[in-house]
Image: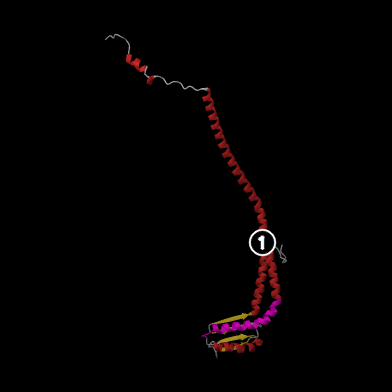
Amino acid sequence: MSYLFDRNFDAETEALTPEAAPAPEPLFTRSDHEQALAEARAAAFEAGYQKGRAEAQEAALASDATRRLQLAEAVVPVLRDLFADAEAHHAALEAQMIDFVLSVFEQLAPDVSAALAEGQARREARSAVRMALGAAQLTLYFPPDSLEAATAELEAAAREAGFGGRLSLRPDPTLQAGAVRAAWDQGVMAYSFAEICARILEALGLARQEIEQRLGQKLTGEPS
């Protein structure tokens, strides 16, 4: 089949439509180029500034932590020495106080014993009367020199407690002044003012020895 015109007008028309035309190349003026360059520089500067700031903060924190650690390492030995000195000082004060109490107690013990021992012994004997209520018999033993002075008081206490007629008071030469021994159906009781004083002195002496052992040295009673 032959044509009058050997051309494809449709293809030529489509080729000339705006949609099929190639996109124009972007055009940049010198001012656009300078503006884009300035923006890129500003962005790079800001990024570098933020990075540098972050690194500086990290370095500052690390430096601060290092200083704190160094300070702690320097302070620990000082505190250790202070605590050791304080402990030694406190121990010396304790020893001084114990020496003072020992000295006073040793000086006053004879006078205190003479003034209070027999009275305390009779008080303990009255307690034995109350503890022995219901027993068939209660026997109280006193030093021979103390028996006569204690008899009237204790017999009266026994009668008041309903124990009259079942109380027996006897001398015991082995007892020191300020001592009493009791025996009844269900038990016994022993009291000695002198032994109590001796135990107090012993406890004070042991306390001083413990302080010396803790510090590893003999104490003179003077604060260090």
Residue 175 in view? no
Q: Which residues are magenta?
A: 107-134
Question: Label 1 neighbourhood size at 10 Å, few (<14), some (14-19), many (20+)?
Answer: some
Find residue 173 and report its horizontal and vertical position in percent: 65, 85
Furthest-front residue in this view: 31
Find residue 170 and report its horizontal and vertical position in percent: 61, 88
User: Can you say which quadrant of the picture contains the C terminus?
Assistant: bottom right
Identify the residue at image location x=65%, y=52%.
Answer: 75
Per the image, label 1 sits on a secondary structure element best described as: helix
- Front-lying residue, 13 or 91: 13
- The answer to whether 158 is drawn above or below residue 62 in the figure is below
- Front-lying residue, 60 or 186: 60
Q: Which residue is mark 1?
A: 87
Identify the residue at image location x=69%, y=77%.
Answer: 109
Q: Report the magenta stretch's main SS.
A: helix
State which quadrant residue 184 falls in: bottom right
User: Can you say which quadrant of the picture contains the N terminus?
Assistant: top left
Q: Is residue 115 magenta?
A: yes
- The answer to whether 217 is drawn above or below residue 127 in the figure is above
Residue 29 in view? yes
- From the viewer's perspective, tell me whether residue 200 is left or right of residue 184: right
- From the viewer's perspective, tell me whether residue 99 is left or right of residue 8: right
- Front-lying residue, 159 or 142: 159
Q: Is residue 158 magenta?
A: no
Find residue 182 and report its horizontal and vertical position in percent: 58, 84
State which quadrant residue 164 falls in: bottom right
Find residue 53 and report its horizontal and vertical position in percent: 58, 39
